Image (spheres, grey):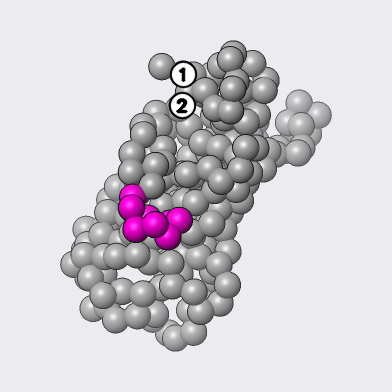
Amino acid sequence: MKLQFFGSKTAGSKAFRRHSVLMLLLTCASLGSARAESADPRLVVILEGTAAGMPAMVPDFDGDGNPDPAFCWDLDLVDATTNRVIGAARDCFSPQNPEGTKGVGTTYFYFPQGTLVSQGKNTGQPVTWDPSMYPDVDPNVTVITGAFPAPGVNNILSGTGRFAAARGRVRLSGAVRPHPDGITLTFNCILVIDLYGPHE
């Protein structure tokens, strides 16, 4: 089933690709800022893979106390240093404007030592360099995403295991490619998680 947003009637049209895809792909996770104030651990991971989006509910972000709707993708969680898969992740996106250039990202990190859930404000835009004219531009990347919360912001919602009482921030630098069906995306997103709250 192809997704349609904001009155788009033709899933294969350029308008559909421009608007619905942008809304779906800002996803690459809930985000944060750069380095924490302390010398606590910094985890650098990659959300990687190709998956079809599915509707789901994520923790409240609009202040009404109720879960909010999103589209989510299940991905591999990769250690950026070793390039080995160390767990799994679910990356969710809730669009906040018709163009899909901004939205709320909610990310579930499933580490062997426990789970982290973060939420933040994502921004994205299409790649502006045409790979047919510039061969050094990767044609498999069509959208760039990112998020950078203000210093001191904690955007970790919850955790289990090692991260049961953790606080911290996560920075996102991501690349996404949509597929013709309108719901499948390929992800290659780097996330920097700085923990500065209690944790083991």
Give the quadrant of residue 97.
top right
Number of marks in the rendered image? 2
* Proximity of marks 2 and 1: CB atoms separated by less than 8 Å: yes
Residue at 44% from the left image edge and 86% from the top image edge? 38
Please tell me the numbered disc located at residue 19.
none
- Residue hosting label 1: 2
Neighbours of disc 1 within 10 Å: few (<14), some (14-19), many (20+): few
- Start-end of magenta stretch: 58-67
Q: Picture coordinates of residue 151 (x, y %)?
A: 56, 77
Is 2 or 41 nearer to us in this picture?
Answer: 2
Magenta stretch containing residue 162, yes or no? no
Amino acid at pointer 1: Lys
Q: Which residue is mark 2?
A: 183
Q: Is residue 39 visible?
A: yes
How far apart, in angstroms, are the residues tagged by discs 2 and 1? 6 Å
Judged from this view, the residue extending furthest toward the right is: 133
Q: Which quadrant: the N terminus?
A: top left
Residue 193 against residue 70 in the figure, above or below: below
Q: Measured from the top left, where is residue 86 in percent x and y?
A: 29, 53
Determine the residue positioned at 43% across, 67% down: 155
Amino acid carrying label 2: it is: Ile
Q: Going by the picture, which residue comes out furthest to the left? A: 161
* Disc 1 secondary structure class: loop
Residue 65 belongs to magenta span = yes
Q: Residue 130 vs residue 152: left or right?
A: right
**Direction bottom: furthest residue:** 38
Residue 176, placed above or below residue 181: below
Q: Nearer the viewer, residue 185 or 150?
A: 150
Q: Magenta: predominant secondary structure element?
A: loop
